Image (cartoon, helix red, strand yellow):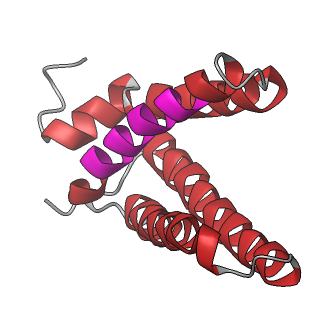
Amino acid sequence: MNTAAPRPVRMAGVLVGLQGLVGVVIAGWLLVAAMRGPSGPVPVGATVAWLAGFGIILFIVGVNLVRGRHGARTPAVVAQLLLLGVCWYAAGPSSQPAYGVPAAVFCVGVLVLLFWPSSLRWATGRPREFS
């Protein structure tokens, strides 16, 4: 299919790409902070690698959504669902609602854009079914 992605899909792509960039920035900040600390970067190495890898993947998914690649929609949805779990943990068990709640609203906003009627028509390639 070569149909152009509707505006909600492109907007979701920008937001997902932004999530990816934030993940990479946080990974870099965490690595620098760990290297300046007394224990060095080893204790946070896996966390930094995970954040950087997930961030890069999210950025690529976001770029592909903006470009109208159909295969990027599912990874974007799955990522938002996974991040909602992180948001729940931040807001609840970690007692950090100032971080968890806004992040959850952001994730839900991306999901709303990805499930907007024009996004569904684009994703399925059947414009008349969702009219």
Question: What residue is rendered at 33% in x and 57% in y?
Answer: 4
Q: Is residue 62 left or right of residue 120?
A: right
Q: Position of residue 48 (x, y in %)?
A: 58, 70
In which quadrant of the rendered view does residue 88 lie?
top right
Q: Nearer the viewer, residue 78 or 47?
A: 47
Most common SS among magenta residues:
helix
**Is residue 63 placed above or below 19 in the rendered structure?**
below
In which quadrant of the rendered view does residue 128 lie?
top left
Q: Position of residue 15 (x, y in %)?
A: 60, 50
Question: In which quadrant of the rendered image does the N terminus lie?
Answer: bottom left
In which quadrant of the rendered view does residue 129 lie?
top left
Q: Nearer the viewer, residue 127 or 96?
A: 96
Q: Position of residue 30 (x, y in %)?
A: 74, 69
**Is residue 56 placed above or below 65 in the rendered structure?**
below
Q: Nearer the viewer, residue 23 or 114?
A: 23
The number of numbered badges drawn on the structure is 0
Instruction: Point out the stretch of residues depicted in magenta.
Output: 73-87
**Is residue 108 placed above or below 69 in the rendered structure?**
above
Pick out the residue farthest to the front. 39
Q: Is residue 62 left or right of residue 33?
A: left
Q: Is residue 63 magenta?
A: no
Question: What residue is rendered at 28% in x and 62% in y?
Answer: 69
Question: What residue is rendered at 62% in x and 62% in y?
Answer: 23
Q: Is residue 123 left or right of residue 48?
A: left
Question: In which quadrant of the rendered image does the C terminus lie?
Answer: top left
Question: What residue is rendered at 40% in x and 45% in y?
Answer: 79
Q: Position of residue 3 (x, y in %)?
A: 25, 56
**Is residue 103 placed above or below 20 in the rendered structure?**
above
